[in-house]
Amino acid sequence: MIRNDQEYKVTKTALISYEEALADFDILKSIERGVAPVIAEAQRTSYQRQAAELREQIEAYDALKGGEATEFSMSSFASIGKELISARIAKGLTQRELAGLAGLKEQQIQRYEKDAYETANLRRLEYIARVLDVNFVGKITVKPASDAFASDFLNSLDPSQFPISEMNSKGWFDNRLDLRRASVSEKKRALAVFFTNSGVTQPSNALHKKTAGPGSRARQAALLSWQARILSKARRKTGLARRYTPLTPDMIASLVSFSRLPDGPVLAVDMLLSHGVIVVFEKHLEKTKLDGAAMSLDGRYAVIGMTLRHDRIDNFWYVLLHELGHVTRHWGPLLTDGFLDEEGDDLSETLESEADEFATNAIVSNEAWAASFVRFTKSPEAVIEFAEKRNIHEALVAGRIRRERANYAEFSDLIGSGKIRSLIKNSGLME
C-alpha cells in the first residue's frame, strides 16, 4: 500500500522500469543467449506480476487522492489500520498534518502506519478515526475454526504437543526454561511469546495439508515452530534487505556461478539479500525431515529457510534454487501459505515440479543437457570438464546425474560432502 507522495513516486518509477523491461523482453533472444526457456518464462511472468501489483497500488492511491472514496468499510480486524491510512489519504492529509490534528508526533503516525496500526489499542484507533472525521462502516466476523491450532491460536497452545525441550536447548525462547520446575502455564507463555515475536499466529493452509493423519499434531507443532524460528531470524535482517525484486536470468546465472568458489554459498546469501530474498539457516527439529522452505515476510520480503540436513555442495545449491523457484514462480501462494519442503513429500505436486524444473534449468538448461553426452558418462573427468565449461561446480553436474540414474553411490567424490555446514557456521550464518 502506498502511504505518501514519496512512496507514490518511487512506485511509479519502479512500474516504469518493469514496463520498459517487459517491452524490451524477447524470450527468443534470451534463449539464443543460452537462457533456459523455463528461466526466461519465469522472469517474464514475474515481471508481469510485479508490474500488475504496482499498477494496482498506484490506481488505488490515485482514487483516494481524487476523493473518490467517501466511506470506508472493514471486514476484519486486520483491515482497520489499512482503512485508517486510506481515510487519511482521501482527506488530503499528510502524516505530519494528521499528527498535528491528533496532537501526536509525526514519527508516531509513521510508526503506526508502517505496521498498519497493529501496535495501536482500540481506544487509539477510535481516536484517530474521530480525528479523521470520516464514515467507517463494517461487519467484522470471526469464523470459528475446527482445529484448536487455528482457533484462538496463542491461547490454545498445548505445550505437550511441542518439542519444548529441544526448542529450549537451542535457546529459542527469550529466557531459558527450567523444565524440571516450569509449570504448564509458564511453558505456554514462553510459546506464546515465541510465536508472537515471529509473527506466526496460526498455521498456514499448507501446514494443515502437510500434517494430516495419525500423529499429525506433534509433527505440525514441530514444523510450525521451525517456520516461526526462520521468520523470527529473517525479521532481524530486514534492515539490511531491500524489497523483493525478481532476479534476471543473468543474475541467476551469476548466482549459480558462485558454486565454483570456496565461499560461494556466503556470496549467494549476500546477493539474494540485496534483492529482498532473506536466506536463513536452522537445523530441522526431530520428527521432521525438512530440507528447505520458502515464505514471505510482511508481503515485502521473500524468505528462504534451509536446514542443511544433507551436508553436500550439490544439495545446498539444488535446495537453494528450488526454494528460489517457489519465490520466482509462486509468489501468490507464497504470500498466504508458503512452502515447507520435506523429504518424501508429494503434496502440491505441480508446484513442487515447477520449482524442481526451475532449479534444474538454473544449473544447466534441459536443452544444453540433452545435447551433451555427459549425462551418459562414467568418467569423473568428463563431469569436471563439462562443469568448467558451464562455469559451475562439478558437484552440481554430478548431483543431476545421480538423481537421474537414481544411483547415489556414483560420483560420491565429486559432490562436496562435508563442505557446507562448517562454512555456513564459520561465516556466522548458523549457530
Image (cartoon, rainbow, N blue to C red):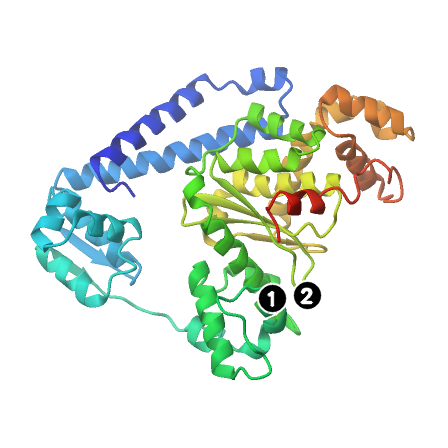
Across and down, in percent, residue 84 comes to 20, 53
Q: Residue at x 9, y 55 (%)?
A: 103
Amino acid bearing label 1 = Ala
375 shown above or below 176: above
Label drawn at residue 286? 2
Query: 66 or 231: which is nearer to us?
Result: 231
- The image quadrant that residue 189 belongs to is bottom left
Crowd band around label 1 with a 10 angstrom C-alpha radius: few (<14), some (14–19), many (20+) = many
Report if residue 120 is visible in the image: yes
Across and down, in percent, residue 329 comes to 54, 39
At numbered mark 1, what does the secondary structure look like: helix, strand or loop? helix
Report if residue 151 is visible in the image: no
The mark that comes first in sequence, 2 or 1, is: 1
Label drawn at residue 395? none
Screen quadrant of the N terminus: top left
Q: Residue at x 68, y 38 (%)?
A: 317
Label drawn at residue 222? 1
Marks 2 & 1, CB-CB < 8 Å contact: yes
